[in-house]
Amino acid sequence: MKVYLDKKKQTMFENNKNRETDLIKENQLLFQFSKVINSDVEINQDELRVLSLFSGCGGMDLGFEGGFSVLKASINERETPYFIDKKLENGFIKLKKTRFKTVFANDILKDARNAWISYFSQRGHSEDIFHHDSIVDLVKMHRNGINLFPENVDIVTGGFPCQDFSVAGKRKGLNSHKNHKGEMVNDKTASVETRGQLYMWMKEVIEITQPKIFVAENVKGLVNLNNVKEIIQNDFSSVNKNGYIVLNPKVLHSADYGVPQSRERVIFIGIKKSALTKSALKELEKDVISSQYSPYPNPTHSYTTEGNELKHFVQLKDVFNHLEEPENTIDLSQKFYSKAKFMGKHCQGQTEVKLSRISPTIRSEHHGNIEFRRLSKENGGQNEIELNNGLKERRLTVRECALIQTFPPDFHFVIENKNGRKGSFMLSPSQAYKIIGNAVPPLLAYNIAKRIEGIWDLYFKK
């Protein structure tokens, strides 16, 4: 069915005048298929079904499912021992799996899809659950009777496009002039199909699927951009005629949760009123919610916060400690790195990461914007021990960026094209940098997921 849809949609998109007509013609053929697919799903009563939007390469999805490896230093054994499944070699541990299972994912980037399928297929997921379509097109198909969204969804997650709200970008916000496929549009008037307003289509998916909870993620810059935060919060609250409580969004710093990186994200959480117990509804409607009922996770590490119970923030030397140099490894994601030359410290990405600190934000740009693992002495490098041992100036590798984001070592980001010409890639190093930089750190998502999992039975009627 998926292959059939992709072939038909390619034709539809080449002919905009007949697009809606073609969708309607497909309706009769596909509606029965979708009914059969949805009706054949056996639902585990202990399983919580996740519909993932703007999935990218799967940072949020992996975090919500758990069962992946992270550095031991990234876990506070005293405060969150229930995170740990078992200890592994090289200073890693495996996290316990959660009750969440991804049943739908989507993204418009082919490279993100390739990375997602490469990893999640090893976890037992069918590649058919990943839809390489824009959220706008998915919703329009649903309106025309093609039921692509799964039934019995418990939670919807989505990191709606953030470039338009980012401090690093042009901060167009809601007035973006890129469309839902990331293409520039000639019309100077922003619409609900432009990138800055794609959260409205996430809202429509929430209206369609009726999850008990939704989690939306974006950059911190959103909260400082006019009244965008309030607009988005109010729009989400209006789902199903004010059917959801949308809590005041909270900015979480990744380093406070064991991620060795300076990355702040604003998290919106909405809860379906009619699914809540009376006591939970009463508590969540208060201006100040008690810690017992708050769905936001408590920090585990001390970076922006302090506390005797908190563990020291994760240092980059812990991340790099077990890695071989690119010329000595068989891991393609560690072998490749940007060869862009040093351009002077007045330019972005021309600094050397500090081994005793956390990393700067891993950005979605690549080549000249990727920080240096080490600089030469001539260019101001401070890592004298490594330089004296003959290690050369270079930028961070793809693997190093992925580990800083807390993706596990067995997640392949550089993938050879074994059916193509020699030296070609199904997922190239430059594209790998981009999708890694766009991702939600899996460990941050895991902290959110474990908190929501922990209060699930407190919130909802059985």
Image (cartoon, grey):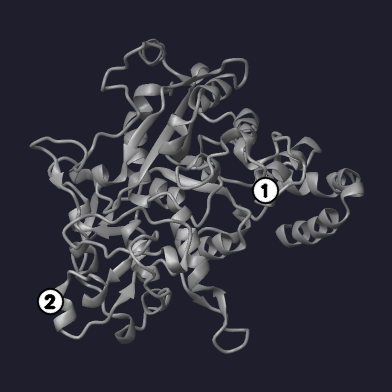
Residue 194 found in image quarter: top right
Mark 1 or mark 2, whichever is nearer to me: 2
| Residue in the image at 17% along x and 46% along y | 76
| Residue in the image at 71% along x and 58% along y | 2
Residue holding disc 1: 134
**Nearer the observer, 291 or 25:** 291
Q: Is residue 321 left or right of residue 325?
A: left
Residue 454 found in image quarter: top left
Q: Is residue 353 left or right of residue 7?
A: left
Q: Is residue 247 left or right of residue 319?
A: right
Q: Could you tell which of marks 1 and 2 lies nearer the N-terminus?
A: 1
Disc 1 packing (10 Å; few <14; some 14–19; many ≥20): many
Indicate the position of residue 167 as horizontal and vertical percent values.
Answer: 45, 42
Indicate the position of residue 245 as horizontal and vertical percent values.
Answer: 48, 19
| Mark seen at residue 385 | 2
Q: Secondary structure at mark 1?
A: loop
Task: Confirm whether residue 68 shows in the render.
Answer: no
Indicate the position of residue 429 as horizontal and vertical percent values.
Answer: 48, 72
